[in-house]
Image (cartoon, rainbow, N blue to C red):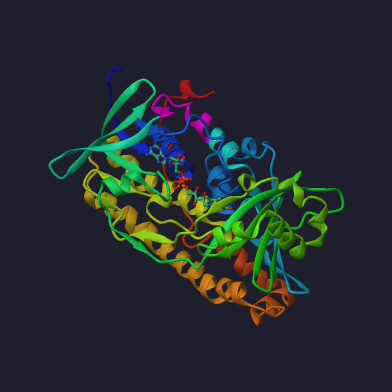
Amino acid sequence: MAKQNLTTSCAVAGGGPAGVMLGYLLARAGVDVVVLEKHADFFRDFRGDTIHPSTLQVMYELGILDEFLELPHQEVRELGAQIGDDQVKLADFSHLPTHCKFIAFMPQWDFLNFMAEKGKRYPTFHLHMQAEVDELITDVDRVIGLKAATPQGELEVYADLVVGCDGRHSTVRQLAGLKVDDRGAPMDVLWLRLSKRPGDGSDTLGRIEPGRFFVMIDRGDYWQCAFVIPKGGFNELRRKGLEAFRLAITALNPKLADRVREIASWDDVKLLTVKVDRLKRWYRPGLICIGDAAHAMSPIGGVGINLAIQDAVATANILAVPLREGKVNEDDLAKVQKRRQLPTELTQALQIFIQNRVISNVLTMTTQPKPPLVARLLDKYPWLRRWPARLIGMGFRPEHVETEELSPASARS
Ligand SMILES: Cc1cc2nc3c(=O)[nH]c(=O)nc-3n(C[C@H](O)[C@H](O)[C@H](O)COP(=O)(O)OP(=O)(O)OC[C@H]3O[C@@H](n4cnc5c(N)ncnc54)[C@H](O)[C@@H]3O)c2cc1C
């Protein structure tokens, strides 16, 4: 098969939230960018559906929010939990200093398709699907491009900068020899869907029972459910059988008894092996990693997508000009890590604290739990609920779009 060659300013490996958003922002700022995604489309397994207020703020600043919110979504303004027999309110987004005071729940593929379509308005945006990055091209120590396998044969992309946005199992970070600092996680998560029925209500709720932690996210006509298990416990659960798993769900929420048989086989249950890690150094000459490729996040708070997007905004803010001028250097890459390292570390520290102090205890608990003091205070004093909302909805150091739209107006739809 024929070998193809391309030259661009920025080659982005991976078309997830980080890669597609970065591609869009750079193309909008007049930088030539090639995004390579290994899958044929964005329709894949559930990978999180949360679009946080800070991401919605970015879309507002980009002038694409109203159009985005025309897509089907649910708006969640409060988060709560059922702890043993008590129901408590934990977070209230309605006071955030952002344009949207809610988390939007939308399938990730709708978000990615939307951003990719917006990117295609710019002549400098080139998205290649079914292009799996498998090699870096180097010149002495510097990365000068990458190679990808495509149905048409090998594609070589030469670039001033390669950005690894290829997620938690990043090939790019491995090929680049970047060192990973694994922070550990005591749990894994099983994701499944159950239909929503009239009378279910619409609260997005976590349920904590002895040895069990269960979350139900309202997705309109179905519930996206997360069943938390001890790390590596999936085989043990499978050994006990599907019926025992269905009964465990019914015990957590008796209302679901009439539909747990929708879990017809273990194929309906997706295992997320929870990882919390981060790169010590996010870059080397000619290459940088962002999003999950730089720091895999725990699902606590559902902030992985948001962080990936915040990384993309910061990367575009810092690198658009040097990329446009063909002068991107290691100091510029260091600035990106410096900007995003603190928010990443603080978020992970909070997630690890909750994993070790709350989730681990719940998973080994044998008696009915009572809401801890913090949960009782949050439930009692509504104004206190603004703080968790701020941490989840905006995170540490929210980014704002600083890049200008420089692409020709004729490219706009
Ligand atoms: C089951 C599950 C549930 C989750 N729930 C939530 C949630 O509710 N909220 C939340 O915020 N986060 C959630 N997350 C985490 C969230 O999905 C990630 O943090 C976020 O998607 C990171 O974005 P990213 O762009 O860095 O990486 P990814 O989304 O992982 O995107 C990486 C992309 O790179 C592509 N790719 C990989 N290797 C290559 C290669 N060699 N060549 C080309 N392309 C490649 C992949 O196909 C993928 O499209 C969940 C994750 C999982 C797995």
| Picture coordinates of residue 204, whole percent (x, y) | 71, 58
| Picture coordinates of residue 196, whole percent (x, y) | 78, 48
Position of residue 292 in the picture relative to residue 76 (left or right): left
Which image quarter: residue 142? top left
Residue 97 appears anywhere in the view: no
Residue 257 appears anywhere in the view: yes
Query: Does residue 134 lie above or below 167 as drawn?
Result: above
Position of residue 180 in the picture relative to residue 123 (left or right): left
Q: Residue drawn at (37%, 47%), measured in percent from left and top? A: 170
| Picture coordinates of residue 5, whole percent (x, y) | 27, 23
Which one is nearer the viewer's eye here, 145 or 148? Answer: 148
Which one is nearer the viewer's eye here, 254 or 381? Answer: 254
Q: Residue furthest left?
A: 140
In magenta segment, residue 125 = yes
Q: Which residue lies furthest to the top in this view?
A: 2
In magenta segment, residue 83 = no
Q: Residue drawn at (72%, 56%), measured in percent from left and top? A: 243
Q: Quadrant of the C terminus?
A: top right
Query: Does residue 35 lie above or below 397 as drawn?
Result: above
| Picture coordinates of residue 33, whole percent (x, y) | 36, 32
Residue interval drawn in magenta: 115-130
Q: Residue furthest bottom?
A: 373
Q: Quadrant of the N terminus?
A: top left
Q: Residue drawn at (32%, 44%), measured in percent from left and top? A: 172
Q: How many labels does the image show?
A: 0
